[in-house]
Structure formats: structure tokens, C-alpha cells
Image (spheres, rainbow, N blue to C red):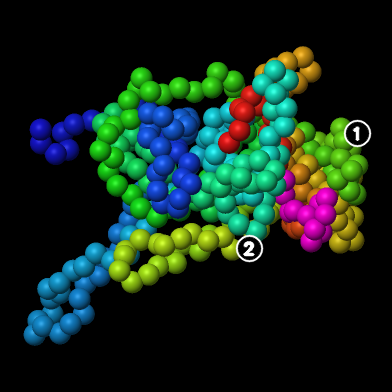
Amino acid sequence: MTIGTGVSLGYRSIFAMISEAAYGTQTATAATGASYFEATSFGMKKEIEEMKSEEINTTRSYTRRFQMNSSIAGGVEKDLHPVDGIPLLLHALGGTCSPAGTTATGITHTITPDETNLVKAGAAGATTITSLSLLGRKGDERAYKYTGCRVGQMTVTGEIGSPIKVAYDISGQAGTAATATLTDTAVSFSTIRPFLFKDVEFQYASTTALLTSTVEEQLVGFELTVNNNLDSDQRALGQDTVVDLPAGMRDVSLKLTMRCDTTTAYDRFTSGEYGAAKIILTSAEVITTGVYYKLSFEMPKVYWNNADPEIGEAGVIQIEPELTCIRGELSGTTGYDIKAELVNLTASY
């Protein structure tokens, strides 16, 4: 067939991920270890820098061209789901993922970040997952594998009338064309629906102990960002790929969209006060009586910025305060800048 005369369609694509216990090494096969997920976009790709020799050769023309550093990067965007795609969420936060409960009553996974970008299973952190292999069948024939992947930034967005969206900016170590194409018959997704805008609750109080439904505040929208500031240029002589993707300082921020009906947010902004905030997503999907699929993000110490409203139209006045989230205390019960709790029926990660 002549190049360019065929047609490959995006809806035939398949996406999956496999946990890596050793950085850059896929430790399971797609048939036995893959976790499949749906996505609205899959932007992972390999890029190779080129260099043209600057040696003088008696002409104005370049006569040599080289391939230099290889880079793996891209984004994955999807609906935020309580079951599918969770390894990306875990790698965005890092730290320890501790389960409690049973599949009969629901399992609560407490995800507490630490000073690494690794995922550790259980309270003791017995199992360490250093990175992910991402598998992508792009269309119905061409498959690619990206190893040594870590999440540089996660952005969770809530807007009225839409599912809750999550976008992951990812960097990796190596990428190859896969020798075996992911097959349609291998794919399976959870029947549970993703989180929707009507599942959102925002709580704000002076301390985490006071975060309850009685301190709920209404939002029009929100954008939660966790930036791991990955160092994607740690290289060594003898290879064209990165040797590691260590995490830098973790930046956590929360941008809110609210109706401006009181001076409360403005007073928080100008006074420089801080408090505790929590985003709770509670699905209508039931695990057992009174227990639902759920995901929450807790920030123990947040400061308010940009709460002075602007007038640009005759309609409803809104504000978009940006909350800076920092560590509650160096060690202790609030020794974190963000913590997540996920309730589903998965026994462990």
C-alpha cells in the first residue's frame, strides 16, 4: 500500500499501564499486568534532538547530521474515575498508599505523599513502585511502549455540567514501537461511572479537625494542581536517555471560582490568614448501604490570594481566589501539604 493512502482512526486506540518495581523496566506483560483505562487524549511521544555538525568543510552546506538526546513526554487527559486510571493518581502524589477495610464494606486507600516520587503499598511501604510503563495502541494497528514514566504534574478540574477532569503531564525514560499489538479482547473497564460535577463538596475551616459538612462552601468551579517539578535532564555519558526523573519541590495550589456574595474571601486574602481545605467527590454509585465510591483531597494549610473581584460585565460577580497549599507541620498529624483518600473495592495497589 502506498504511504498516506490508508486511514487509522483514533477511537480504535487502547491505553494501558503497568507498574515498574525497577525504574525503566516493565515487570509484567500486557496480558497479565496491564491496567486499562479510557482517555480523552493520549499525547505520549518520543522525540530525538538533532544536531548538524558545525565543522568547517569548505562550503556553506552542512554535511553531517546526528541524533542526540532522546526524550519521552506527553499528557494523558481523562475523566477522573474511582477505579480506572488510579495508578496515575498514585504516582502524581507518591508516598504511601495504605488500604483499610474489606471488599464487603469498601476499602479506603489513604495516600500520603512523602519526600520521594515513589509509591509504597501498605503502612510499612513494603512494596515500592518506582515508575510506570505506558502502553498505547494508536489507532487499530500501531502500538507503542513508554517505560520509566513518572507524573510531573496533575491537574484536577471541576466545572458545572461536566465530569470531573484530570490531566497528567508525564515524562519517561525510553520509548519503542511495541512488538505485540494490544488486542480488543484484552481490554476491560470498570462499570462504575466517573465522578461528575454534582459529586463535589468543598469544605473550609481553621483546622483539619473542623472539616465537616457543616463548613461546606459553594463553588462554581475549581482547579487543583500538584506539580512535582520533575528534573527531566539527568543524563550520563554512554546513553541518550535520562538515567532518572527525580522530583523537586512539590507545589500544590487550588484555584476556586466562587460567586462574590460576601467579603469573607476578601478578608481571608487581606488578613493573610490560613486554614484547612478539602475537596470531596462522592459518587452516587453504592458499594454497600451508606458507603459510596469516593475520593477526597485534604490540604491542612492554605493561604488565600487574588480574592478582589473584577467587573467586566453586567452579570453575576465572581471571584477566582488562588489558594497556596503548604505543609501543615514538619511532622505529626498534619505533616503533609496534600493527602488523598480513595474508597473503592480494589484490595491493594
The residue under the point 79% across, 38% down is: 202
Q: Quadrant of the C terminus?
A: top right
Question: Residue at label 1?
Answer: 214
Three-letter amino acid code at the position of disc 1: Thr
Towards the viewer: 132 or 32? 32
Look at the image and tell me whether residue 185 can be seen.
yes
Please tell me whether residue 299 belongs to the stretch shown in magenta: no
Question: Residue at label 2?
Answer: 249
Does residue 89 lie above or below 267 as drawn? above
Look at the image and tell me whether residue 41 can be seen.
no
Label 1 neighbour load within 10 Å: few <14, some 14-19, many 20+: few
The residue under the point 14% across, 39% down is: 3
Please tell me whether residue 334 belongs to the stretch shown in magenta: yes
Three-letter amino acid code at the position of disc 2: Met
Judge left or right: residue 283 versus residue 6: right
Give the magenta-colored segment's residue range: 328-339
Earlier sequence position, callout 1 versus callout 2: 1
Judge left or right: residue 144 versus residue 333: left
Of tags 1 and 2, the one toward the viewer is 2
In percent of width and height, residue 178 lies at: 28, 40
Does residue 100 lie above or below 112 as drawn? above
Does residue 148 lie above or below 122 as drawn? below
In percent of width and height, residue 252 lies at: 68, 54
Q: Which label was assigned to residue 226?
A: none
The residue under the point 36% across, 19% down is: 185
In percent of width and height, residue 235 lies at: 40, 67
Q: Secondary structure at mark 2?
A: loop
In percent of width and height, residue 128 lies at: 56, 47
Towards the viewer: 65 or 117? 117
The residue under the point 86% across, 45% down is: 208
Q: Quadrant of the N terminus?
A: top left
